[in-house]
Amino acid sequence: MGEHLKIACGVFGAINLKKQSVFPYIYWGLRAQNHRGHQSHGFLTFLNGEFYIHRSLDLVPKIRASAIHEWFGRLPGHVGIGNVRYTTSGKTDEKSLIEGTQPVTASKSGLKLAISFNGNVVNTVQLKKEISEDFPGFSYGSDADLICHKLLINLTKGKNLEEAVKTCMEEIEGAFSVTGITKDGRFFAFKDPYGIRPLCAGHSADKDIYAFSSETVGLDINGFYRDFEVEPGEFVTVSENGFSRVKLAKDRKAFCAFEFAYFARPDSFFDDKHVYEIREEFGRNLVRENPEVVKDADMVISMPETGDDAAFGVHEESGLRWERATRRHRYVTERAFILLERERYATIDKKINILASKVKGKKVIVVDDSIVRGDTTRVTIEKLRRMGAKKVYMFVTFPRIIGPCFYGIDMATYGQLIGAKHAPDEIAKIIGADAVCYQSIDGLVRATGFRKDELCLGCITGEYPTPLAQRIADEMRKRFLEGYEETGRLYEISEIFDKC
């Protein structure tokens, strides 16, 4: 179940060329992508040189019919961007969460800019110092602030928007998929040179509305057609003639492999496949790679909902019955990572309902998307044992995670990763399973349809696509093995950054 992992954000932006209100499209685009960020949400629209902003904590709210006109009045304009966020940088107290809510704005010398961002910046320490020279007292709420201010600094130095974006691509290391609006209402989007995080573009049937969305489901809910995935290092603008695309930076594509296993909605579409189809193939791969376990098992169950599609693949390939004996309690929404240890256990135990009569006396294959810390998996296996399961085999679609992520997933230290310290057989003993079977890296790559060199696999191979991330990972791995106690996200520790 991704063990309550957090991804940085989901973005959506749109322009209505007929100059009619764009807010409803942004609202629904974010509702469709709320899975990408639960902590906060924000809307920003543009009208006659002014930005109108609404930002708040928690999920995107339901809007009552009686309040619709109020929302339209609060957020007028034909261009807008929105964001749903989790924190993978900065502080997580309530004040900091509010300050870090996106979209963000920056202004200087008569220029003004707004952006919504998904990803994570690696060279934050360096950028904070640089930005503080132009903006004394610069207040850092999130990495979006870094990108917004860096863009604005480039513009104040006489660069046009395209040149300003190009400089950002050259001088900011990390993952960034960005939508933005200038003071004159120019609507744009761009991706980092590796294209680590998703961002697609589409239009309405009448071609009056053009939009950018982290996932295709944001387009689908609005009835828009998907045109293309924004390429790595690509800068896209919208005019009366539709999309205008230009490649500003070239490097190898390194799309996040974890999007396929956990984060993306199953009905989202990447390149030429729906995510659920890829997850089904993950399940088939696990059967092919572990024939002896399959031969010994009686049935398959899954950890809902990200394990469901892979479980169907296991069922199809093996012929074992997929017993729908696990169900999520949909309205038990407490996040285990903010609770005390004893509360964490109780909350995890309450989130999933397992039907005891279906597993008693059975040798069970449990299909899950990943094992990060091991907490959720251990609690689930204990529950299965209490209910009389004879054996419990874990089939895990994402290969063993051995290193931190620098690009927008909040697993930023070695110490929190059970796979960084233990081999699969040791992990099985720790969590109480009879065996832990991870999908192979080669199997995962084949199922995605991408080439291996087109994916970011840093957290499962230790090989990162960007140079500073690699140096920090290598330095911290060495310290971790020597017993160094990690005190926070690796890319936010000045001492480590300066050394690397």
Image: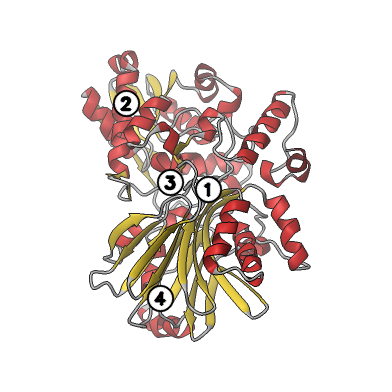
CA distance separating discs 2 and 3: 20 Å
Dividing the picture into quadrants, the one containing residue 95 is bottom right
Crowding at dot 4, Cα within 10 Å, few <14 / some 14-19 / many 20+, comes out as: many
CA distance separating discs 1 and 3: 9 Å
Residue occupied by mark 3:
263
Q: Are marks 4 and 2 in contact (CB under 8 Å)?
A: no
Residue occupied by mark 2:
285
Crowding at dot 3, Cα within 10 Å, few <14 / some 14-19 / many 20+, comes out as: many
Q: Secondary structure at mark 4?
A: helix
Q: Is residue 380 left or right of residue 491?
A: left
Please report whichever mark, 1 or 2, sits nearer to the chain's N-terminal start.
Answer: 1
Q: Is residue 159 above or below residue 336?
A: below
Q: Secondary structure at mark 2?
A: helix
- Nearer the observer, 86 or 434: 86
Crowding at dot 1, Cα within 10 Å, few <14 / some 14-19 / many 20+, comes out as: many
Please report whichever mark, 4 or 3, sits nearer to the chain's N-terminal start.
Answer: 4
Disc 1 versus disc 2: nearer the observer: 2
Q: What type is the residue that disc 1 sits on?
A: Lys
Q: What type is the residue that disc 4 sits on?
A: Phe
Please report whichever mark, 1 or 4, sits nearer to the chain's N-terminal start.
Answer: 1
Q: What type is the residue that disc 2 sits on?
A: Asn
- Nearer the observer, 249 or 214: 249
- Nearer the observer, 125 or 314: 125
Please report whichever mark, 4 or 2, sits nearer to the chain's N-terminal start.
Answer: 4
CA distance separating discs 1 and 2: 26 Å
Residue occupied by mark 4:
23
CA distance separating discs 4 and 3: 25 Å
Please report whichever mark, 2 or 3, sits nearer to the chain's N-terminal start.
Answer: 3
CA distance separating discs 4 and 2: 43 Å
Q: Are marks 1 and 3 in contact (CB under 8 Å)?
A: no
